[in-house]
Image (spheres, rainbow, N blue to C red):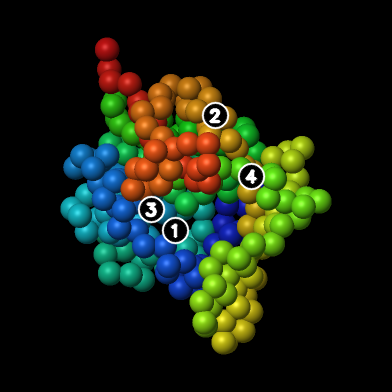
Amino acid sequence: MPFDAGAYGRYVADVYDETYAYLTPDAAVDTLAELADGGPVCEFGIGTGRLALPLAERGLTVAGVEGSPDMVAGLRAKPGGQRIEVAVGDFADTRVPGEFALVLLAFNTVFALPDQAAQVACFRNAAAHLRPGGRFVIEAWVPDPAAFRNGRALRPVRVTEDDVLLEAAVLHPAEQRMTTTKVRLTATGVQLLPANHRYAWPAELDLMAELAGLRREHRWADWSRRPFGDTSSDHVTVYRRPERP
């Protein structure tokens, strides 16, 4: 099937904010604001503005690319959302006018792209948005095929008294893909939130960055900048476009 950049949003836009309300953005916003150093920010997969709106509240100019019109509608409905320029399209190749100090691709969204070629194109698109010396920041999980049994896995993401979020996943290792559906159980019923992932190891992302003319500047285990190591399950990686000679 052709890649549909808006498919995820059609399933999740109405419940995205409440489903992921437990993800507090403070540490991410602090780090991103420091890395942007007062310059403009472009977020790929800007969604409903979980990070973009707090960054704008810090006084930064924020723009974005988003594949889902439904997610953009959620952003527009929030205070300040109308002031953020958003281009609707595939962030592997959709451009926003201007040059940016920082391009952001958070919360594993790089894996929403369908294949390696699209991810390589995304890195090149990020580099094309950056001014000299600008930074491309990616947040992603580290693949863990050992967590699967016979290519299947079911894991709790969050469990509270009135809200349970599970993830069911099928692994396709030959293509580095995962077919997943998050299952949200609340007092009002059951919601199914499907998503597909083309996963990549950190070293593969580093190579994509090199192909785009970017160089790795930092890799941390999380937004609080803890050191990345053998047991890290996630990473925040900062790539930088060289200054002009």
Q: Give the Cα distance between marks 1 and 4.
A: 26 Å
Which residue is located at x 51 percent, y 22 percent? 211
Q: Give the Cα distance between marks 1 and 2.
A: 27 Å
Outermost residue on the top side: it is 245
Q: Where's residue 155, x and y in %? A: 64, 62
Residue 6, image quadrant: bottom right
Q: Give the Cα distance between marks 4 and 3.
A: 34 Å
Outermost residue on the bottom side: it is 187
Q: Report the disc number at residue 47.
A: 1
Under circle 3, the secondary element is strand
Q: Amino acid under label 1?
A: Gly
- Quadrant including the C terminus: top left
Label 3: which residue?
A: 86
Q: Where's residue 30, x and y in %? A: 26, 50
Which residue is located at x 41 percent, y 62 percent? 23
Specify which label sits upstream in the sequence, 1 or 2: 1
Label 4: which residue?
A: 144
Label 2: which residue?
A: 203
Q: Amino acid under label 3?
A: Val
User: Badge 4 local density, few (<14 within 10 Å), some, or many (20+)?
Assistant: few
Q: Give the Cα distance between marks 3 and 2.
A: 30 Å
Q: Is residue 146 visible?
A: yes
Under circle 4, the secondary element is loop
Under circle 2, the secondary element is helix
Task: Point out the frontmost of discs 1 and 3.
Answer: 1
